[in-house]
Amino acid sequence: MARDEDLDLVEVADKANPPVCRIMDYGKFKYETAQRDKESRKKASHVTVKEMKYRPKIGQGDFDTKTRKVEQFLGEGNKVKVTIMFRGREMQHPELGRKILDRVAEVVSEVGQVELYPKQDGRNMIMVLIPGKAKTKKEKPRPAPAPVSEIPSESEPAVSPTASEPTVPPTADDAAPAATDG
């Protein structure tokens, strides 16, 4: 039957009882499978990890240059591993390295965010940044405070008048206390 149509008889499931076969053009099938695989590889994103090394006693100019480069890497869509390298007595002051990593994260917060927060790894302290804007907590807008005229005073009740009770503004006689001779 397959020879009559110039197609191939392909065994699909050999473990089944009886084995399952399919009539198809095997060359065309292999070609289409290769094309699908090639297309899926194109769509896959290849994220590379770049590394930038700092020292605890880094100067301002070097810090700015390296941090600009970190921003550039993040802008290109790469992950960046920021490393602080400690030598000798610098190991006694990991807070200096933490300050530098915090400053880097703050400077690049427009183009990247922290994926792995700073942690000590032997003589190095590392932090990983990923591209994308950092998500900040949105504060709910607070309602504006009521004007002073709408806040009831302690002497006045906070009950609003009903439709059956007409509101009458106070007169000068009501507001002035009675004078007593004494």
Image: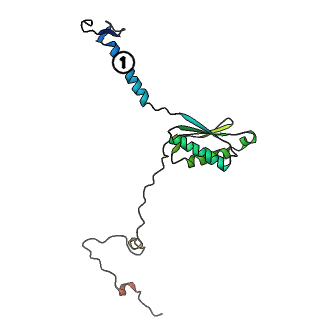
Q: Is residue 29 above or below residue 169?
A: above
- Per the image, label 1 sits on a secondary structure element best described as helix
Residue occupying the point 34% across, 14% down: 27
- Indicate the position of residue 30 as horizontal and vertical percent values: 37, 16
Query: Residue farthest to the bottom?
Result: 181
Front position in the image: 65 or 100: 65
Type of colouring: rainbow
Q: Amino acid at mark 1?
A: Tyr
Front position in the image: 180 or 42: 42
- Indicate the position of residue 99 as horizontal and vertical percent values: 64, 48
Q: Quadrant of the N terminus?
A: top left
Q: Is residue 1 above or below residue 50?
A: above
Tell me: 38 left or right of 108: left
- Indicate the position of residue 41 as horizontal and vertical percent values: 43, 27
Q: Quadrant of residue 145?
A: bottom left
| Mark count | 1
Query: Residue farthest to the right?
Result: 89
Residue 28 in view here? yes
What residue did someone put label 1 on?
31
Residue occupying the point 55% across, 44% down: 71
Front position in the image: 7 or 109: 7
Q: Is residue 39 above or below residue 14?
A: below
Residue 114 in view here? no
Mark 1, other Cα within 10 Å: few <14 / some 14–19 / many ≥20: few
Tell me: 111 left or right of 124: left
- Indicate the position of residue 87 as horizontal and vertical percent values: 73, 39
